[in-house]
Image (tube, helix red, strand yellow):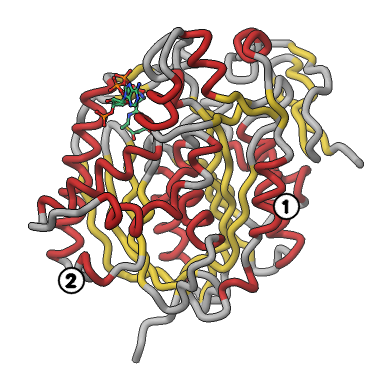
């Protein structure tokens, strides 16, 4: 008997109200803009308004999925983030009143740096394989923040991805085989008392490369496809050039000598959204998938490779096959509008925006700044108060 196909049935993205052009950051920092545009492969970064956070982005990403598919059979919501808003309560519980989630549905938050979204996807697939009637909502939502004036500042960003994981999926059927690599390494971390991440930049790049090779070798040992079989490679993209570094490294380790054109053929279509959003941590590899699927190439029945990396670290190499008719399910127009409708933020406003939404401040009222359907209105007695904005 063939195992039942399980995978991504729907995929939706959301970003923030603002973006900052890295040309502005370069000018203020006295850096040649090509270091960012070409050297890092980043052009813009998403910046949340004062009344946005990972919950408002998650709600905006998940709402279109629930509108299209309803909540029947939805038994689990897995919310992956490394910019959590509470040390105890799962961020997904705030979605109940915002989205009308059912009460007979478990809600859990997952954390392992940028890898958390992939852990959620794999756990979701296992739940659906056990009971194909069930559907799982996977959400990956993050705001990447580093110390101002640090080398990490141009690699900030924000976005959320929501995915409905089901049996007989309409977009991508996941392969059962996957390869994993994990080790204890201090390449990037955020202690509980900090709102910005700490990072050893060069070590983090080396760690990413080593972990990707380790995950790839495990994938192959377990019977995964050969490198030449994939139509494209979706990497975690802290900055889009990282995908190029990792893919070149993977190909060279396997005896290939790729040209720039070879690398572009495997990667370019996966980078177009991340280049404009910046690092979205847990969401980034699935933002890469959305950009690839929205591109003009017909990927029907083609295998796609994924490399998910979370500092600290865990990497997973896995694969999936694009389902016939997938284009009918895509949100290509909505994704283009989401990117186009963000507003430019001035450098001064970007630098003065409060980080209060991530720090426990007791009480705070957020004036209306964003224009989306969901906002955080206040923190009262350390309780977060979200609201739906009627348009
Ligand atoms: N024109 C064109 N290219 C230029 C240039 C110019 N004028 N000036 C510099 N460059 C190039 C450099 O040659 C370099 O390219 P290569 O890496 O191909 O050599 C690139 O621009 C970046 O320059 P530097 O290495 O000098 O940059 P940096 O040291 O200031 O910072 C960074 C780079 C370490 C990535 C830093 O941005 C950082 O710490 N970012 C956060 C950590 C991170 O993203 N790590 C990635 C792996 S960890 C991970 O993936 C998890 C996660 O999400 C954080």
The residue pinned by badge 1 equals 63
Quadrant housing residue 115: top left
Label 1 or label 2, whichever comes before in sequence order: 1
Which quarter of the rendering shows the C terminus?
A: top right
Residue at image location 39% in from the left, 32% down from the top: 38
Q: Which mark is residue 27?
A: none
Establish if 358 lies above or below 337. Answer: above
Asked whether 74 or 228 is in front, the reply is: 228
Q: Quadrant of ligand 1?
A: top left
Q: Residue 223 carries which label?
A: 2
Q: Which residue lies furthest to the bottom in this view?
A: 1
Q: Position of residue 127 (x, y in %)?
A: 46, 65
Q: Position of residue 217 (x, y in %)?
A: 14, 56
Q: Where is residue 350 in the image (x, y as percent from the top left)?
A: 63, 15
Q: How far apart are marks 1 and 2 (CA)?
A: 38 Å
Mark 1 crowd level (few <14, some 14–19, many ≥20, 10 Å Cα): some
Disc 2 under 8 Å from ligand 1? The reply is no
Q: Where is residue 172 in the image (x, y as percent from the top left)?
A: 47, 69
Relative placement, left or right, of 166 versus 207 is: right
Relative placement, left or right, of 8 versus 55 is: left
Secondary structure state at the residue bearing disc 2 = loop
Mark 2 crowd level (few <14, some 14–19, many ≥20, 10 Å Cα): few
Asked whether 342 or 119 is in front, the reply is: 342
| Residue 76 seen in the current view | no
Residue at image location 59% in from the left, 30% down from the top: 46
Secondary structure state at the residue bearing disc 1 = helix
Q: Residue furthest left?
A: 255
Residue at image location 55% in from the left, 39% down from the top: 141
Asked whether 200 or 73 is in front, the reply is: 200
Which quarter of the rendering shows the N terminus?
A: bottom left
Establish if 7 lies above or below 54. Answer: below
């Amino acid at each position: 008997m063939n195992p039942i196909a399980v995978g991504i049935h729907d995929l939706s993205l959301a970003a923030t109200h603002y973006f900052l052009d890295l040309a502005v950051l370069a000018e203020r920092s006295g850096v040649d803009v090509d270091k960012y545009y070409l050297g890092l492969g980043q052009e813009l970064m998403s910046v949340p308004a004062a009344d946005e956070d990972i919950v408002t982005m998650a709600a905006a990403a998940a709402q279109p999925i629930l509108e299209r598919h309803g909540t029947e059979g939805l038994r689990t919501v897995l919310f992956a983030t490394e910019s959590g808003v509470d040390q105890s309560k799962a961020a997904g519980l705030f979605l109940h009143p915002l989205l009308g989630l059912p009460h007979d549905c478990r809600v859990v938050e997952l954390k392992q740096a940028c890898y958390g979204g992939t852990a959620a996807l794999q756990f979701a697939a296992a739940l659906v394989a056990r009971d194909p009637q069930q559907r799982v909502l996977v959400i990956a939502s993050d705001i990447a923040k580093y110390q101002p004036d640090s080398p990490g500042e141009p690699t900030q960003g924000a976005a959320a991805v929501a995915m409905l994981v089901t049996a007989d999926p309409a977009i991508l059927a996941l392969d059962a085989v996957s390869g994993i690599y994990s080790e204890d390494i201090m390449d990037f971390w955020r202690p509980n008392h900090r709102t910005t991440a700490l990072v050893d930049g060069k070590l983090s790049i080396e760690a990413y490369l080593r972990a990707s090779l380790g995950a790839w070798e495990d994938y192959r040992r377990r019977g995964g496809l050969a490198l030449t079989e994939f139509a494209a490679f979706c990497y975690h993209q802290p900055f889009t050039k990282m995908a190029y570094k990792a893919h070149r490294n993977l190909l060279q380790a396997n005896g290939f000598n790729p040209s720039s054109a070879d690398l572009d053929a495997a990667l370019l279509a996966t980078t177009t959204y991340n280049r404009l959003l910046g690092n979205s941590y847990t969401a980034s590899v699935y933002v890469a998938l959305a950009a690839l699927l929205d591109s003009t190439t017909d990927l029907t029945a083609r295998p796609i490779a994924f490399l998910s990396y979370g500092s600290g670290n865990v990497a997973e190499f896995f694969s999936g096959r694009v389902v016939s008719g997938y284009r009918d399910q895509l949100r290509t127009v909505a994704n283009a509008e989401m990117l186009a409708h963000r507003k430019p933020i001035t450098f001064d406003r970007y630098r003065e925006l409060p980080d209060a939404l991530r720090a426990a401040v007791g009480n705070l009222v957020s004036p209306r700044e964003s224009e989306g359907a969901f906002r955080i209105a206040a923190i009262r007695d350390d309780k977060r108060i979200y609201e739906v904005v009627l348009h």
